[in-house]
Structure formats: C-alpha cells, structure tokens
Amino acid sequence: MTRRVDIAVLGATGYTGRLCVAYMAKALPETVSWALAGRSEAKLKTLAEGIEYKGAAKCSIYALDLTSDAAIAELARSARIIVNLIGPYVSTCGSSVIKACAENGTDYVDCSGEMPWLQDMISKYDEIAHASGAKIIVTAGWGAVPADLSTYLAVQHINKTFGLRTREVLVSLDDVEASFSGGSINSLCGLLDNYGSARIAAASAPFRLAPVPRRPADIAARGVLPGPNIFGVQTVKDLGVSAVSTQAEIETGIIGRSWGLYVGVAHTSQRPDSYGQNFYFSSRMRMSNVFVAWGFRTLYVLLVAAFEHIRPLRTLVTQRLFPPGTGPSAEQRAGHHFSYRTVAVADTPDNTAAPSVEVDFAYDNDPYVFTGMTLTEAALVLLEGGTPAHERGGGILTPALLGDKYAERLQRPGAGVRIDVKVIES
C-alpha cells in the first residue's frame, strides 16, 4: 500500500492540536511529510498559513467528513501514522479512527484518558491491529506518559542493576502548576454521560486492561511501602504526605496494561523485561500536610459525585465555563510546570533487604504543551522503529512499549524533559 504522507494530525485546529502542530513545525525532520487533517478545510488552511516553520517540511491539508467511516478509512490508507487529538474519543470519531487504523495496518497515537472506551477498543480491535501490524499507542500525553514511562524506567533499572523483578512502584505528582482545558473537562463529562462512574472505576481497576488475565486473588491488596491510613493519606520517606492522584484511574489502567504487555504469554513464561508477577502500583499526589491531603481528597470525591448526579452542572461546565477548544493562554502557560517522583522497590524473598530505585521526571512548561510534544515524539519513534512495540508487531499498546528510545527522545534539548534514574537505600 502506498502512503501519501508520513504523519496525519487529526484534530489539528483544536486547542491541544494547535500546540502539537506548533511543536511539529520545529521538531519534524525535513524528510518527514505531514498533513493537517480535520472537518473544516477553511480552518485547516488558516492554521497552516500561520505556522512558523523551523526545520520541518511544509505541511499539506486533508479535509474529510468525520462522520463517514469510508472517509476515515481512506485517511488511514493515506498515512503511515495518525495522531488523533479529537475528543472526547467516546463521543466523536475516536472509535472509527482506531477501527480504520487497525484494519489498514496504520500506526496511531492519541492522548485519550477514557478507560471504559479504551477497554471497548481493546476488546474490539486489539487482535485486528496485532494481525495487521498497526501499532496503536494510546494515552501518550500528560495523563499517562510521566507515570508509565517512569515506571518502565524504574523496573528496567532494577532488572539490569540487580537482576530482580519489581514488587512495588509508587508514582507521585510532586509539584504542578497548571490549569484545565475544555477538552479535558468535556472528556470527563462524556465518560459520565456514556458509562457512569461505576463502569469508569471498573475499567480503571488494577490490571483490568492487561492482556494477561490476573485473578483478584493474585493481586496484592497493598505494596511493601507504608500504605494509606483510613482517611486515604499516605506518608512515605522522602516522598512526604500524599493523597490519591486525580489521574490515578488513568495511570492505574495504563500501567496495568503495560505490565501485561511486558509479562509475556503467561506468568510462567515471563519476558526478560517483565515487571514481575507480584507487581503492585499506586498513583499519588504530594500534599503539604495530612489535613490538606484529607481535605483535598474529600473535596475531589464530592466534586466527581456532583458531576455524575447533576447533569445541569455538567452542561454548565462544558458549554459555558470550559467549552471545547479552550484552554490556558500563552501568558498563563508561561508559568506552568510539573514534576513527578517515582519510587520502585525490588521483589526479594521475605525478610531480605530490597534495593530501591527513584525516577525523577520534570518538565518546565505547560502539561498541554507537553502533550503536543509527547504525541509528536511518539510518532517519530514509530517511524524510526526498533522498539518493544515493533518487536510485538502491533496491537493496542501503551507509551511504555516505545521503551528506551522514547525516553531518549523526550530528553532531547528541544523536547525539554529531564529524567534522572538512581538507586536509593534499601
């Protein structure tokens, strides 16, 4: 099959889409062809005319009917990779795009965080994508990349340094200065409208999205680090006081799938880079003290409950306060940043000292700028090849399946991520 373009950016005129396009204009090699794809040819042309090229080849325009499966399939046949930024994925063309890519062997990247929808996509198209060779990388944005990649790096460091599997990984959002976009809020409300909180929680449960079945009896109730108290507040040496992260459902779902993709065909035939049979993961946010941690988590639970049960509130927020296509301005983004700290503990026999590894992951810019960058770099890694995703041959995969090459690309001077991996005391 002849592909007319290397990368097609679907949803280029949206808020995160524009940030992604701006990064591509300076990061894509001149040899990579790319196109802006979407519904409105006029909007696409306006966006293309305003691009400041800093090394990339000039992009082309690809307008299509996003309600037509045939038109989406033609786009999939025309591109080597589709970067899809149109959300909410569950209520737009997300399912049609993944179907088209899976059937046509087209690689794919998105920044979805919609776990029930992703569970449906895995059920319907994972085997089809594996057969066609389509490498479908989901949630390759701020919602999962820092946690998923930090976990991967920590696990591999323990394996290479000590020859051990990993017993526990705790990812903590250590510091963040950011604000919401209309797309993020609309995705949350779209999930509640289409699935409800019970289905969201079920799809986000540990290892629910893993390709390797894991019975509840096989999943440890907690790790080896000091666990949360009855109020959900956790205190760990060097990480401080924390509460469950607002991104815990996304990170738990994605990292559980990464665990399964690396574990091998069955527990008895683990890959050399397997995370381990006893692997446990948790996602936290650092708080200044125990009272703030308890108050934050309580307020968050009440807010989500209000969103779920009060439909007029969802309408107000999505149509008036945070409509689609909106987000922090360039001036607001200038002061944004985030950093994660991850602690991983090796799996050792009972009563023996367990070596630990810490991964520090930091980015001195806005999370939405980060997402535009990570989507671009994921697409470039897919073009380059030589990753665990390519070894596997295809399927619905996670950012961790892009492996060390992805981590290296994110640390390039133009990308701006800082990652430090080090051994800490047992």
Image (tube, helix red, strand yellow):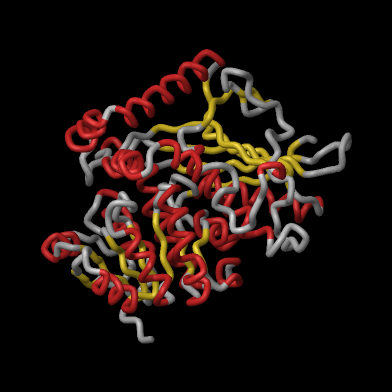
Report the side of 16 relative to 350 (left or right).
left
Quarter that holds the C terminus: top right
Can see residue 333? no
Vertical placement of 304 versus 21: above or below?
above
| In-front residue for pair 207/359 | 207
Question: Where's residue 129, x and y in %?
Answer: 48, 70
Report the side of 34 relative to 40 (left or right).
right
Question: Where's residue 185, x and y in %?
Answer: 31, 38
| In-front residue for pair 28/150 | 150
**In the orientation shown, which residue stands out farthest toward the bottom?**
1
Quarter that holds the N terminus: bottom left
Vertical placement of 413 versus 350: above or below?
below
User: Residue drawn at (46%, 50%), measured in percent from left and top?
Assistant: 416
Question: Where's residue 173, x and y in %?
Answer: 52, 34
Vertical placement of 256 versus 172: above or below?
below
**In the orientation shown, which residue stands out farthest toward the top?**
291
| In-front residue for pair 139/396 | 396
Q: Quadrant of residue 67?
A: bottom left
Can see residue 114? yes
Question: Where's residue 124, x and y in %?
Answer: 45, 63
Q: Quadrant of residue 354?
A: top right
User: Residue drawn at (33%, 78%), measured in percent from left and top?
Assistant: 77
| In-front residue for pair 220/26 | 220
User: Residue drawn at (41%, 36%), measured in percent from left and top?
Assistant: 197
Q: Quadrant of residue 35?
A: bottom left
Vertical placement of 159 versus 337: above or below?
below
